[in-house]
Amino acid sequence: MAQRVSSSRQHDFLLLTLAGALTVVAGLAGIVEGLVRVVPNRDVPVTVDLADVPHELLLDGSVAAEATEAVVRVSALGPVPYMLVVAAALLPAITLLVVAVCFALLGRSFYRGDFFTRGNLVALNAAAAALGAGAVVIPTLEGTAASSALVNAGAESGQAMVLGLDMTMLLAGLLLAAVGYAFQRGARLKRDTEGLV
């Protein structure tokens, strides 16, 4: 049963829906941009981590700096490095797209006055799972793709698989999981109180 929502809160939920929809468009644009950049398999930009091999630079001939990342352009990647690079280019945008769709659905549901529903719980859990998985998979895939691309180009690489972790994304996923748990408790409480009426 939908709850009545004040017009000011409806306005906020409408903004949430619009923000989610705009982010969906941004995610789709990111996927298209990644495909355009990588699919031709020519001069594909691959970010390489230089943390283990710091390179000192001089900016303007006087300011010392240390490069920790570099962009290497590779062409004619073999099948395995190519698939890794394609996946590494697309996965961040796909993760953003999943989370944005979930928030757009939540905003639409809240706007209608539906709060503690199964659909909202599924949307929150899906967004939390996407962020949690992305926190490990995205940096690991990016590092492994860079290492594989370097080997394909004939350069030495430290290891075949590079494990990574994005703490910001992981914390965001844990926060959404906590909100999802609160929604689950709210849905249970709503069912219990409706049974008493």
Image (cartoon, grey):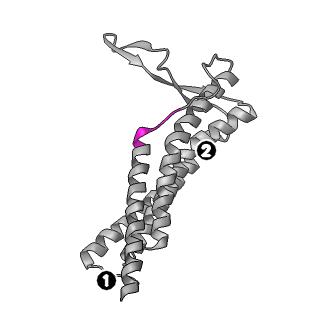
Q: Is residue 45 visible?
A: yes
Q: Which residue is mark 2?
A: 36
In the image, farthest residue toward the top? 62
Q: Counting other residues with Cα less than 10 Å from the Cα at mark 1, is it few (<14), some (14-19), or many (20 or more)?
A: few
**Which quadrant would residue 103 be assigned to in this image?**
bottom left
Residue 35 in the image: x percent, y percent? Answer: 61, 45
Which kind of residue does numbered mark 2 sit on?
Answer: Val
Residues drawn in magenta: 164-169
In the image, farthest residue toward the right? 79
State the SS at label 1: loop
Q: Which residue is mark 1?
A: 4
Q: Is residue 191 above or below residue 169?
A: below
Q: Nearer the viewer, residue 161 or 47?
A: 161
State the SS at label 2: helix
Residue 186 in the image: x percent, y percent? Answer: 37, 70
Residue 123 in the image: x percent, y percent? Answer: 48, 64
In the image, is 23 to the left or to the right of 147?
A: left
Q: Looking at the image, which residue is at 44% across and 65% down?
A: 104
Q: Looking at the image, which residue is at 37% across and 75% down?
A: 111
Which kind of residue does numbered mark 1 sit on?
Answer: Arg
Structural distance between the alpha carbons of marks 1 and 2:
46 Å
Q: Is residue 103 above or below residue 118?
A: above
